[in-house]
Each structure stands twice: as structure tokens, then as C-alpha cells.
Amino acid sequence: MTEPMLQVNNIEVIYNKVILVLKGLSLEVRPGQIVALLGANGAGKTTTLKAISGLLKPEDGEVTDGSILFEGVPIHEKEADEIVRLGIFQVMEGRRVFEHLTVEENLMAGAYTRPGREFKRDLEVVYHYFPRLKERRHQKAGYLSGGEQQMLAIGRALMARPKLMLLDEPSLGLAPLLVRELFGIIERINKEQNTTILLVEQNANLALQIADYAYIMENGRIVLDGTPEVLRENADVREFYLGLTEVGQRKSYREVKHYKRRKRWLS
Amino acid sequence: MDTFIQLTLTGLTNGAILALAALGFVLIYKASDVINFAQGEFLLIGAYLMYASIVQIGLPWTLGVLVTMVIAVLLGILIERLVLRPLIGEPIISVIMATIGLSSLLQAIVRMIWGSQPKSFPSFIPSDPVNILGATVGADRLWAIGIAAALMLFFSLFFRFSKEGIAMRAVADDQQAAMSMGISVKKVFAWAWSIAAVTAAIAGAIVANIVGVGPHLSHFGLRVFPVVILGGLDSIPGAIVGGVIIGLLEAYVGGYISGSLNQVISFVVLVLILMIRPYGLFGREIIERV
């Protein structure tokens, strides 16, 4: 098997010097993969991404233990702008487009770390994936619809030509049809641009459809991992994340089992 | 009619200088939400640097301008390092207080080096009287308008088309998202303060050319407030329009009504604007999607 591109080794993240959010989390991303990171609200998914991209520091978060290696280089003590230059780009949760800048200016900001002469070509690549952005290139990003803003956020990431793209809940607040379209494009970017992707999602079903490998987090730890095929067969995942229940079982029995499962996971 | 043109030109000159001083102020506010109370001292330092290089060292004025600009940039970078960086993550109000301290410090330094006596300034810009539509004005005033307009145009283009300019606007919009693009916020702050220091220094040199140097020049810092409140604290076009309006208003009031009222009128405007349109003429509207 190929060497992992990103290795997160047993990291611990503490906010404000007191709140322990990640408690010994490890994961690996190999080149060319789409890796999904699933979990409930507050499990620490976003924190994990921010620990990788270096965006924890302005929030008073700190990696206090363990290490993060990108292509063999430790990055957990580097500044966010250095990490972007190394080839990791995080698309933040909630889109976070620059509302008072036009679409094209947003894309220019995305290309900040790139040499200027490649700007035109990269711009065409983005417009190729998101033709709607081309139509609205001179509009202020604040007036785009939610879906278009998410496209812009991903387009901005494409402009930086990252080796590894971290996507934080791209489906947030979007209509199901649009989410499907977006995930299709994410898959194409992964294949055609050879961009490795680490995807954080609440929508486990969709994420498992495009992922090559998936991790499930709870309470600051990885509790399960495997290929989507394996995870989909797992009874816990089926029940808690895919909303499927075994038919024909008595309710009371299931509740007991549910309790036991929860407990096993948390121990 | 002559008086009117005369007053208009005077007003435009003052307005241009005010707009230059306001530009840096707006820039710092835009990038970092900090109100810079030391803006007037930047003007002061610019004027004295010009004085030092032309009169005391005897450089030709072209070189003098260059030296002034370079030192102003260094001053901006130095302030970012020594004052702003240690305050990262602290509440904005602490930073604003620090700029008040900075303004006293800079003033004291200027007094230490050059004393507190006003000094005359050899005008380096030609000041021969020029006849325009029957009114007579010094050519230096026309130059002031021209220089200010050129600088304003330059910075408008800079913010529209250059990578660093767009990065600065991105930081103003969403600091954390800008960081995720690989934009160094520290670098952007250093840029903002340097540009603020340079434009103010140039404004200072222009003022000094017209009225001479003295510690009183730092009062311009206070006169910037009506301009930016009128134009909108975070708007560059606002700084220009605000500067011109306040400049003209002061000139007309001074010329037609009373010479002692002209300094007051701009603050009357300030209060009115705060009551009617607190975000100013061009202040940033909050975009709300429907």
C-alpha cells in the first residue's frame, strides 16, 4: 500500500488551556482517496480539521500531545498560512465567503498563495466545474444563494490547487438535490484534479457513497473505521448513522441492546 | 463669484488633504476594526521628516519625499510588531487605548527631536499664483489636489486588482476565512498600518508646504473624525467624498458666515450624521440574503 499523505497520530486538543476536545485521535489519509469523518454534533470533527489546517490557534485551541504529519513533515506547530502553502486547504463550515467581495475577487483571494500567471487557467478550471459562478462572476458573493456560496467556497479551494482538501460539512443547509449535485462534483474533483479529500459530514449516507474509507468519531475519539462496505454492514452504524433498524425485533429488546451498544462505544 | 471659486478651491485643497489623512484611518478600521487615534501624529511625523530631509539634511525634495515614505513604511511595520502583535487576541478596546498611548508617544518624540516651536517650511511645490475663472490661488494648492487625487486613484486600483489589496479586503470581511486562504493576517495588518502611515505622511508634507510645520499639525487627526463618520468608517470612497464635503463646508462657512465657525461646523455635521445615518454615507451595509 502507498504511504499515507496525512497522518494524525494520537493528538490531544485543548481549548483555552482547560477544555479537552480531542482525546488521542488518530487517522490516516492516503493520496488520491476520499476519506469521510463522520460523527454527531460536538464529537470534535471540526476541531480535527482545524488542528490539521492550523486554524485552531486564533481560537485559543492547541495541539498538546501527539503529532500531525503531512507528507512526512510535522505540521502541528506551523502557522495556517504555511500549511496552505504546503498544500492543505480547508473549506470551512458555513461557507464563509467574503460577502463584500465579488465572486471573482473571492477566487482571487483563494489563489493568494499561487503564482499570478496561472490565475487565468485555474479560473477556467473552477468555471468548468461551476458554470453558475461564471455567470455571476461580478456579483457580490453575499448575494449568492446558499448553494452558489458553497460552490464558491469549494471553487476558492480549487484555486489554491491543494494536494489535500479538507471539506467541513459541505451539505449544511442545502436542498437534497443540490447536495447530490455537489457531491458528484466533489467526486469528479477528486478523480480529475487528483485532489485528496478529507470530508466531514453529518449526512453519513451520502458521505459513505463517495468515500474510499471512513472514520466514525464520538467524544473526541475515533470509535470505528473501515471501508464504506464494511461500515454499512455494521449494526451500530446502520442504526445510529444511517437510520436503518433491524425489522422484526421486539422494541424492548432493542432498547436494551441500544443501551449496551452506547456503553460499549463510550468505554 | 470670485469669492465662490476661491473658497471652492481652498475647500477642495483642505478636502483632499483630509481625504488622504482619512484614507489610512479607514484602512486600519477596515482591516482590524481598530480606531487609530494616532493618525494625526502620522501626519505630524510626515511633515517633520520632510522638514528634516529638505531643510536639515538638504536633500532635494524628490529624495526627501522618498525618504519620508520609506521611514513611514518602517514606522507602520514597527508599530505592527511592537504594539499590535502583542495585543492579538485581546479585546479591540485595548488596542484602541494603545493607539491613544501611541499618539502621545509619537508627539513626545517629535517634540524631543524638533522642539515645539512652529517652523517655516521652504515650499518645495511651486506656489506661484494661478488665475482660474477670475480667482487667484497658489499653484501649491492645485498640486495638493492633484497629488491627493492621484494617490486616491492608485489605492482604489490597488484594492480592486492587486493580490495584496484583495487580501486586505478579505481580512476585513472575515479574518478566519482569510487565514484559511493562506493569507497572513499579521502581514495584512503591517500593510494597513504602513499604508496609513505613508498616506498620512504625504498629507503632512503637503500641509507643511502650505502652512509650515509645528506640533499643531496633529490636530488634523481630530479633524479626520467628521470626515470618516460622514463617509462611513469602512469606506474608501467615503473617505474621499467625506473629505471633499467637509473641506468645502469648512471653506464656505468660513468665507460666508464666520471665520471662527468653520472648525465647529464639521463637528455639527458629525453629530447630525450620527443621529440620522450612523454608518455614514457609504458605510458597509450588512448583507442579508432573502
Image (cartoon, coloured by chain):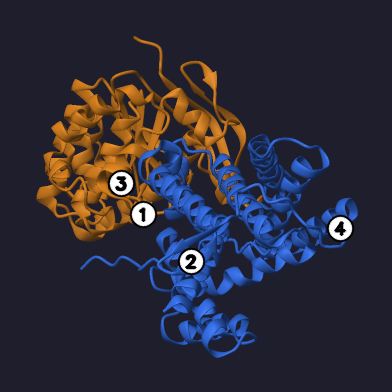
Chain colours: A orange, B blue
- The reply to whether label 2 and label 3 mark residues of one chain is no
Pick whichever of labels 1 and 3 is earlier in the sequence: 3
- Give the SS element for disc 2: helix
**What residue is rendered at 70% in x and 40% in y?**
B71
- The reply to whether label 1 and label 3 mark residues of one chain is yes
Q: Residues within 10 Å of mark 3 (few under 14, many from 20)?
A: many
The residue that mark 1 highlights is A259
> What is the CA distance from the residue labelled 1 to the residue labelled 4?
76 Å
Three-letter code, disc 4 = Arg
In the picture, measured across the screen, residue B80 lies left or right of residue B32, that is right
Q: Which chain does tag 3 point to?
A: A
In the picture, measured across the screen, residue B223 lies left or right of residue A116, that is right
The residue that mark 3 highlights is A169
**Of the pair A1 and B111, the residue shown nearer to us:** B111
Name the outermost residue toward the bottom.
Answer: B257
Q: Which chain does tag 4 point to?
A: B
Q: What is the x, y in percent for residue B4? A: 45, 78
Is residue A203 at all visible to an observer of this figure?
A: no
**What residue is rendered at 69% in x and 36% in y?**
B60
Which of discs 2 and 3 lies nearer the camera? The answer is 2
Q: Residues within 10 Å of mark 4 (few under 14, many from 20)?
A: some
Q: What is the x, y in percent for residue A144? A: 21, 55
Q: Which chain does tag 2 point to?
A: B
- Give the SS element for disc 1: helix
> What is the CA distance from the residue labelled 2 to the residue labelled 3?
53 Å
* Label number found at residue B12: 2
Quarter holding the N terminus of chain A? top left
**Of the pair B61 and A226, the residue shown nearer to us:** B61
Q: Are marks 1 and 2 in contact (CB under 8 Å)?
A: no
